[in-house]
Image (spheres, rainbow, N blue to C red):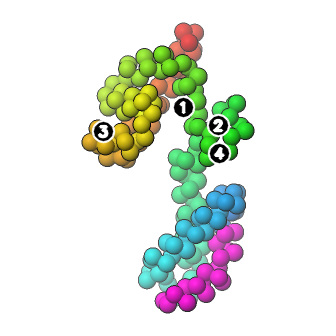
Amino acid sequence: MTKDAFSQLMAQYERLIYTICFQLVRDPGIAEDLTQETFLSAYLHQDTMPAGYERQWLGRIAANKAKDHLQSAYHCRTVLPGDEGLPPGLAPPAEEVALRRSGAADLAGFIHSLKEPYRLVCQLCLLEEKSPEEAALALGRPVKTIHTQLSRGKRLLREQLERRKQDGTV
């Protein structure tokens, strides 16, 4: 398919793809981004596009992009009371706010009581405020592994906080 033919395809189906994305994510800005991602993906994989089924093929790509976004960790972030005024991209994840509210000394104690590999990852990312990428470099582990260990470490910390709260020691 030539560039001109693909440009015509984009012009023909741009509103449809945007509508599909918007119906799923309910955010105009994200729907625009997903529309662009859909057409980029379609361009990169245009050799697999079935002739005569361009509309359905593009619609399926758009729906999958929107569903992937809705299942992403970024989208599933929770905002705690007191952070409602912040835009969604600037509001910190709920567990980080809860950890900050529990006090730095308590947090450090909780982190040091974790088992490896969570202790070191949480120490680097939560106490020393390093990014997961920086922690991966420092520890010589894949970034995806650091993300997983950090997520699990935060869950363990949250469980410790909840137990302490129930016991009345926090």
- Expressed as whole percent of the image width and height from the top left, the position of residue 145 reads 35, 43
Q: In which quarter of the image is the C terminus?
A: top right
The nearer-to-camera label among 4 and 3 is: 3
The nearer-to-camera label among 2 and 4 is: 4
Callout 4: few (<14), some (14-19), or many (20+) C-alpha neighbours within 10 Å?
some
How far apart are the alpha carbons under marks 4 and 1? Answer: 14 Å
Q: Which of marks 4 and 1 is nearer the N terminus?
A: 4
Q: Which residue type carries mark 3?
A: Ala
How far apart are the alpha carbons under marks 4 and 3? Answer: 30 Å
Q: Is residue 87 above or below residue 152?
A: below
- Residue 168, by quadrant, is top right
How far apart are the alpha carbons under marks 2 and 4? Answer: 8 Å
Q: Which of marks 1 and 2 is nearer the N terminus?
A: 2
Q: Which residue type carries mark 2?
A: Val
Please say if the residues under marks 4 and 1 sit with CB atoms less than 8 Å apart: no
* Residue 138: assigned label: 3
Q: Is residue 145 visible?
A: no
Q: Which residue type carries mark 1?
A: Glu
The residue positioned 30% from the left and 39% from the top of the image is 138
> Which one is in front, 74 or 16?
74
